[in-house]
Image (tube, grey):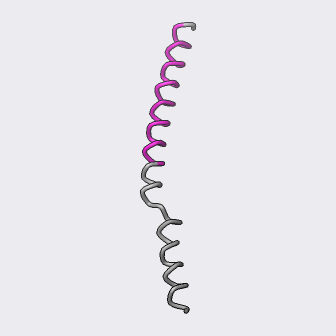
Amino acid sequence: MDTPGRGDDEQRDPESRREPGWSANSGRLVIVLSCLTEVIQFVSAILDLVS
């Protein structure tokens, strides 16, 4: 009966890792960082016009 328990543990390990989820999160992070970069450039351009 130990073998089915070990099999259940092995099935839980890949779910806890979720490597595709990490790649999706890193893609979202890249998008967020690029948007923040655009916002910073926009704000700096406005500040240059004001000053």
For image coordinates 56% across by 13% down, the residue present is 47
Relative to residue 51, is residue 13 depicted above or below? below
Span of residues in magenta: 25-49
Could you tell me residue 8's position as x and y percent? 52, 78
Q: How far from the left and from the top, in percent, is residue 6?
A: 52, 85
Quarter of the image with the C terminus in it: top right
Q: Quadrant of residue 19?
A: bottom left
Residue 29, horizontal then vertical, whole percent? 48, 43
Pick the front one: 29 or 19? 19
| Above/below status of 36 relative to 6 | above
| Residue 17 lies in the magenta stretch | no
Q: Main secondary structure of the magenta part?
A: helix
Residue drawn where x is 55% and y is 92% of the image: 1
Residue 49 is situated, as x and y percent measured from the top left of the image, at 52, 8
Residue depicted at x 46% and y 54%? 21
Q: Is residue 46 magenta?
A: yes
Tell which of 2 and 20 is nearer to you. 2
Q: In the figure, 36 relative to 30: above or below?
A: above
Choose between 18 and 1: the one closer to the eye.
1
Identify which residue is drawn at 48% across, 23% down: 41
Q: Residue furthest top?
A: 50
